[in-house]
Amino acid sequence: MAERVGGKILFGGGILASALVTLLMPVAARFSVYMLIALRVLQGIVEGVTFPSMHALWSCWIPPVERSRVVSFSYSGIQLGIVIAMSLSGVLCDYGFAGGWPSEFYVFGAAGCLWALAWFVLCHNTPSAHPRISLAELRYIEISMEFCETLGKSPVP
């Protein structure tokens, strides 16, 4: 799906949908436990596109010799983000607005929406579609990809 629709749309759309669902969590929790469970299931579904779409984007953007480093760095960043978010969640529950615990959903949901907006403006599916890429960087990526294809390797990491 990421290769058909484009990793940019699928990844950014998944993050945006997850952020919007996050914003609805406190309302759902106050309304019905079943609505909260349904939203969590929906959130899990929309986040399911994250990793496949990242790999589709990396296959277009990252030269083969650099992929393992980029993937390792990205996956490490996910773990670091979890540590930071969990620490910040405790602070927001204690000192946040809207009764404490709801503030963490509003803060992270709003941050996800802002991130998605920046993503859709700044990111592109392929280097050749990017309007601000330097000619040297574009050529480096294209040459790296061509070399990989001549060796008979698949472009998807």
Image (spheres, rainbow, N blue to C red):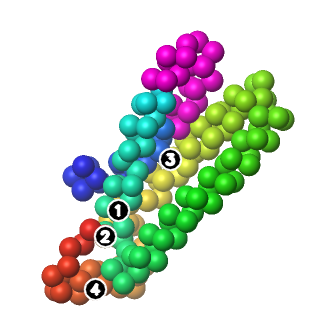
- Report crowding for label 3: few under 14, some 14 to 19, many 20 or more residues within 10 A (C-alpha): many
* Amino acid type, label 1: His
Mark 3 vs 1, N-terminal side: 1
**Helix, strand or loop for the magenta stretch, by majority:** helix
Residue under numbered circle 4: 143
Q: Using residue 3 as the reference point, say whether residue 89 is left or right of it.
A: right
Residue under numbered circle 2: 157
Q: Is residue 37 magenta-colored?
A: yes
Q: Residue at x 50, y 47 (%)?
A: 116
* Amino acid type, label 4: Ile
Image quarter where the C terminus lies is bottom left
Q: CA distance from mark 2 to mark 1?
A: 6 Å
Mark 4, mark 1: which one is toward the viewer? 1
Query: Quick one: SS at disc 1?
Result: helix
Mark 2 vs 1, N-terminal side: 1
Mark 4 vs 1, N-terminal side: 1
Give the residues drawn in magenta, as a range: 19-38
**Residues marked 2 and 1 touching at CB (< 8 Å):** yes
Q: Is residue 98 shown above or below 148?
A: above
Q: Position of residue 69 (x, y in %)?
A: 46, 77
**Residue 55: mark in rendering:** 1
Mark 4 vs 2, N-terminal side: 4
- Report crowding for label 2: few under 14, some 14 to 19, many 20 or more residues within 10 A (C-alpha): some
Q: Is residue 60 visible?
A: no
Q: Position of residue 78 (x, y in %)?
A: 55, 58
Q: Residue at x 74, y 46 (%)?
A: 88
